[in-house]
C-alpha cells in the first residue's frame, strides 16, 4: 500500500510503520497509508524558523501578496486533478467547489489585502501620538512578523480550504507554516501541496506538510510561534493545555465545532419568500458536505405554532435530495469522510434520542444510487425534534458532526435568543426575517454568543453566501464552546502573526524608521542637499520622490467675494457661508469660507505647471479635517509633504477588449500630508491626498 508523503525539511519523506489506512469514502476501497512515525518534529519546526522565516521576513507585504496571487493562479490550472481526488472523500461537485475553489479564493482575497499594507517588511499600526509640548517626542505602533512558525492542526474534513484559508494569512504576514490536515482525507491535501512545492513559488521552508499524527510537535514550540487548531472542543482543550504552550505563552487560536443555530422570525409564514428561504437554507446546510461542517446548522428554532408545518416542509425538502456516488450527476449528497466518522455520528444521535425523536430519516438505512450503502460511508439526513428545549438540554450540548439537526419551539423572540445562547458559544447563527425590528432585537440580544450572525431575507438571499460560508475578509470564529478564536477577518487575521511593538522617538527618527512621514518631522526641502533645487514634487517620477519631500506654497487672501462665488458655483448656501447672516448664537464670528473651497484653493497653490508631468491624477482624499474657521481677509498657505509611497500593480488583462486607457502605464500611489495654515501660522485643516504617479521608465506621451 502506498504511503503518503510528508514534505519536511525540503524533502518528501514517508513515515515508518503501518500507519493509518485511508479509504475511498464512496467505495470503501483502500487508498493509501498515512504515518508520521520516525519524523523528527523538533527538526521540522526548527527548519521552518531557520530557513522559511528569514526568507519570508525579507519580502515586503506586496511581494508576499503577489506571491499568493501567483500561487492561486497556479493552483487554478490543476482543478481537474483536485476534483478527481476530492470525489474519493465523498464530496459532490458542489462540496468540492466550496473546498477547492473556495480555498483558492482565499488566496486571491488575501493577496488583494497587500494594498492595505505598505511595500515594506513591516507596517505602522493605527494612529501616531504626540507626547510633547515642542513636538519633539512622539509614539506609534508597528507590526512586524514573528520569528517563529505557524502550526496549523486541522481535524475536520475540508482538506483544501482548511489548509489554504490558514496559510494565506500567515504567508502574507511573513511567517512560515507547518500544516497537519485531518488524516482521513489528507491524501487530497498532499496532492495540493505537491503542486505548490512543484511550482517553486513559495520560498523554501515556507510550507511543510505532515500527514498523520502531529506527534510531539507542540512540545517544541517557542514564544515566537503561533498555533491554530480546528476540530472538536475537547481535543482543542487538550492541545491548548500543553505545558510548553502555557509556559511559552504561545498564541493559540482555536476554532471548535459548535452548536450553531438558525431562527425563524415570528413574521415568517407559509407563502412568504422567507418561508422558502428558511427551508432551503436548512436543507443545504444539512446536506452540503454531508453535514460535516464546523458551521453546520445543528439547532433549528421555530415559533411553537409553526413547528409541525416547518418540520414537515424540511422533511419534504430532504426527501428530494438524491444520495449516492458523487460522480453521478444526479447526486446532491455524498458520503461522510469515512466509516469511523459515520459511527461517531450515530453514537452522538443516540445520545440526542434520549430527549428527542426522529421526524425524518433513519440511522439504520439509506437509499443510495450508483454505490453500495454498506461499503461506502453513507448516511441518511436525520431531523430530530425536541419539544422541551429548556428541560431536555442534550441538543444544546451534544453535536453529531454529520447531516443531523434538531428542531425546537420557542414562544417569543426573547425566548429564542435565550435558547440560542444555551449552545454556550457558536461560530455562527442565522435569523430569517423580513422584520427589521426583529432582526435588530435578535442581533443585539444574541451577538455576545455568536462569532457571526447572518440576517437572511428576500433582499439578500439570491446573493448571500449562506449560513455556513465564512468569508475571507470577515472574522471566522466564535466565543465559548466555539473556541474563542478568530481566523481570517481581513487585516485582523494577518495581525495574529505579527508582533505589535510600541515605538517612541522624535518625529524625524520615527519617519526614518517607518518610511511614513510623521507630523513635525524634518522635511526633505529642495535646498541642494543631494536633490535638484526647486524641483516641484509633481515633476518627480515615482522612484524619484522621497518620503519628506515638501513644498510650502505662496499665500492667498480669501475674500468675501470668493466665498460668494463658491457658494453659487457649488450650490452650498449654508447659513455660515452667507455674509448677510446674523451670527449671534452661532459658532462663528462672521461669514466663513467653505472647507471645500479652502481645499480647492490648496490644489491651486500646490499644483504646478500646465504641462504634462509624472503626476497622472488625483486618486482621492483621506482624513480630511477642518480645524479652524477661515474668515474673509485671511491669508492661507499650504505645507505639502510626501507621506508614503505604495506600488500600484498593473491590471491583469486577459482579453484585448478588456484593455482600458492607462492600463499600459507603470505607476504607483503617493500619499501626501497636507496642512492648511492662516496668516497666524495656525493650522486650519489637515488632509491626506492620494495621487497616481508614473514611474520613470514609463515614457510620457507629449
Image (cartoon, helix red, strand yellow):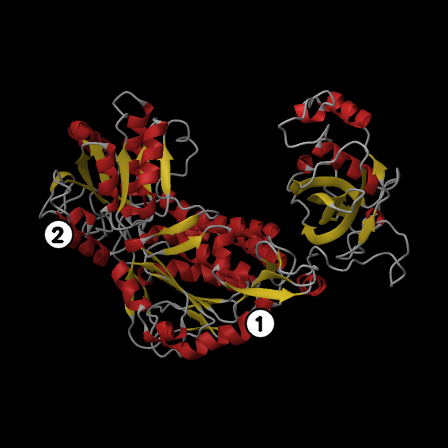
Q: Image height check: is 140 above or below 590?
A: below
Look at mark 1 in the image and give the residue it sits on. Answer: 54
- Asked if residue 481 can be seen in this view, the reply is yes
Could you tell me which secondary element the residue under label 1 belongs to? helix
Q: Residue at x 89, y 57 (%)?
A: 532
Q: Image height check: is 537 above or below 240?
A: above
Q: Are marks 2 and 1 in contact (CB under 8 Å)?
A: no
Q: Calculate the distance from the C-alpha at mark 2 to the C-alpha at mark 1.
A: 51 Å
Look at mark 2 in the image and give the residue it sits on. Answer: 351
Q: Residue at x 18, y 38 (%)?
A: 408
Question: Percent x, y for residue 485?
Answer: 38, 56
Q: Residue at x 70, y 36 (%)?
A: 629
Say whether residue 653 is left or right of residue 69.
right
Count residues near mark 1 (Cα–Cα under 10 Å), then give few for <14, some for 14-19, many for 20+.
many
Say whether residue 589 is left or right of residue 214.
right
Say whether residue 622 is left or right of residue 36.
right
- Asked if residue 329 can be seen in this view, the reply is no
Which residue reaches farthest left?
354
For residue 100, the mark is: none
Q: Earlier in the sequence, mark 2 or mark 1?
A: 1
Q: Image height check: is 188 above or below 567?
A: below
Could you tell me which secondary element the residue under label 2 belongs to? helix
Question: Percent x, y for residue 313?
Answer: 21, 29
Quadrant position of residue 573: top right
Question: Percent x, y for residue 34?
Answer: 33, 68
Q: Residue at x 71, y 33 (%)?
A: 596
Q: Quadrant of the C terminus?
A: top right
Question: Percent x, y for residue 19?
Answer: 29, 71
219 or 323: which is nearer to us?
219
Amino acid at each position: 500500500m502506498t504511503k503518503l508523503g510528508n514534505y519536511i525539511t525540503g524533502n518528501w519523506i514517508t513515515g515508518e510503520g503501518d500507519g493509518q489506512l485511508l479509504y475511498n469514502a464512496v467505495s470503501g476501497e483502500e487508498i493509501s497509508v498515512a504515518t508520521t512515525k520516525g519524523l523528527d518534529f523538533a527538526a521540522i519546526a526548527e527548519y521552518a524558523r531557520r530557513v522559511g522565516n528569514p526568507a519570508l521576513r525579507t519580502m515586503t507585504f506586496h511581494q508576499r501578496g503577489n506571491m499568493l496571487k501567483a500561487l492561486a493562479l497556479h493552483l487554478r490550472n490543476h482543478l481537474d486533478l483536485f476534483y478527481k481526488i476530492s470525489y474519493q472523500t465523498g464530496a459532490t461537485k458542489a462540496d468540492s467547489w466550496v473546498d477547492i475553489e473556495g480555498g483558492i479564493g482565499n488566496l486571491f482575497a488575501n493577496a488583494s489585502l497587500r494594498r492595505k499594507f505598505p511595500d515594506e517588511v513591516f507596517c505602522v499600526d493605527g494612529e501616531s501620538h504626540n507626547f510633547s509640548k515642542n513636538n519633539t517626542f512622539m509614539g506609534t505602533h508597528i507590526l512586524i512578523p514573528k520569528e517563529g512558525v505557524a502550526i496549523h492542526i486541522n481535524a475536520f474534513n475540508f482538506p483544501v480550504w482548511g489548509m489554504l484559508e490558514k496559510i494565506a494569512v500567515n504567508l502574507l504576514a511573513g511567517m512560515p507554516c507547518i500544516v497537519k490536515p485531518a488524516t482521513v482525507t489528507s491524501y487530497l491535501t498532499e496532492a495540493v501541496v505537491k503542486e505548490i512545492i512543484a511550482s517553486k513559488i513559495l520560498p523554501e521552508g515556507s510550507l511543510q506538510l505532515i500527514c498523520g499524527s502531529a506527534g510531539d510537535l507542540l512540545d517544541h514550540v517557542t514564544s515566537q510561534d503561533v498555533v491554530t487548531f480546528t476540530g472538536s472542543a475537547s481535543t482543542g482543550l487538550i492541545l491548548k493545555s500543553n505545558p510548553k504552550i502555557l509556559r511559552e505563552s504561545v498564541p493559540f487560536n482555536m476554532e471548535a465545532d459548535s452548536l450553531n443555530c438558525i431562527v425563524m422570525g415570528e413574521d415568517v409564514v407559509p407563502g412568504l419568500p422567507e418561508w422558502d428561504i428558511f427551508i432551503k437554507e436548512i436543507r443545504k446546510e444539512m446536506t452540503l458536505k454531508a453535514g460535516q461542517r464546523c458551521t453546520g446548522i445543528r439547532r433549528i428554532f421555530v415559533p411553537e405554532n409553526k413547528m409541525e408545518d416547518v418540520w414537515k416542509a424540511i422533511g419534504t425538502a430532504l426527501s428530494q435530495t438524491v444520495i449516492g456516488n458523487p460522480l453521478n450527476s444526479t447526486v446532491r449528497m455524498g458520503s461522510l469522510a469515512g466509516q469511523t466518522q459515520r459511527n461517531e455520528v450515530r453514537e452522538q444521535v443516540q445520545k440526542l434520542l434520549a430527549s428527542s425523536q426522529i421526524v425524518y430519516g433513519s440511522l439504520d438505512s439509506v437509499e443510495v444510487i450508483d454505490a453500495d450503502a454498506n461499503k461506502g460511508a453513507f448516511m441518511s439526513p436525520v431531523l430530530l425534534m425536541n419539544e422541551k428545549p429548556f428541560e431536555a438540554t442534550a441538543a444544546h450540548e451534544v453535536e453529531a458532526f454529520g447531516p443531523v439537526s434538531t428542531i425546537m419551539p420557542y414562544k417569543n423572540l426573547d425566548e429564542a435568543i435565550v435558547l440560542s445562547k444555551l449552545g454556550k458559544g457558536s461560530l455562527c447563527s442565522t435569523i430569517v426575517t423580513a422584520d427589521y425590528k426583529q432582526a435588530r432585537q435578535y442581533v443585539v440580544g444574541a451577538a455576545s454568543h455568536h462569532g457571526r450572525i447572518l440576517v437572511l431575507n428576500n433582499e439578500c438571499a439570491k446573493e448571500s453566501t449562506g449560513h455556513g460560508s465564512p468569508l475571507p475578509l470577515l472574522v471566522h470564529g466564535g466565543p465559548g464552546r466555539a473556541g474563542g478564536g478568530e481566523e481570517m477577518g481581513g487585516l485582523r487575521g494577518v495581525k495574529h502573526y505579527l508582533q505589535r511593538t510600541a515605538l517612541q522617538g522624535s518625529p524625524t527618527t520615527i519617519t526614518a524608521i517607518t518610511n511614513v512621514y510623521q507630523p513635525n518631522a524634518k522635511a526633505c526641502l529642495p535646498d541642494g542637499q543631494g536633490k535638484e533645487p526647486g524641483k516641484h514634487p509633481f515633476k518627480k517620477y515615482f522612484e524619484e520622490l522621497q518620503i519628506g519631500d515638501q513644498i510650502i506654497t505662496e499665500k492667498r487672501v480669501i475674500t468675501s467675494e470668493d466665498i460668494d462665488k463658491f457658494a453659487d458655483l457649488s450650490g452650498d448656501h449654508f447659513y455660515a457661508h452667507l455674509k448677510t447672516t446674523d451670527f449671534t448664537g452661532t459658532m462663528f464670528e462672521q461669514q466663513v469660507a467653505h472647507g471645500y473651497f479652502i481645499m480647492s484653493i490648496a490644489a491651486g497653490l500646490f499644483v504646478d505647471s500646465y504641462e504634462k508631468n509624472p503626476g497622472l491624477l488625483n486618486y482621492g482624499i483621506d482624513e480630511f479635517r477642518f480645524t479652524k474657521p477661515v474668515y474673509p481677509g485671511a491669508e492661507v498657505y499650504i505645507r505639502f509633504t510626501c507621506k508614503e509611497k505604495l506600488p500600484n500593480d498593473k491590471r491583469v488583462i486577459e482579453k484585448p477588449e478588456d484593455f482600458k486607457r492607462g492600463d499600459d502605464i507603470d505607476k504607483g500611489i503617493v500619499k501626501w500630508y497636507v496642512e492648511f495654515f492662516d496668516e497666524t501660522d495656525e493650522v486650519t485643516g489637515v488632509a491626506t491626498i492620494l495621487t497616481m504617479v508614473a514611474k520613470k521608465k514609463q515614457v510620457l506621451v507629449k
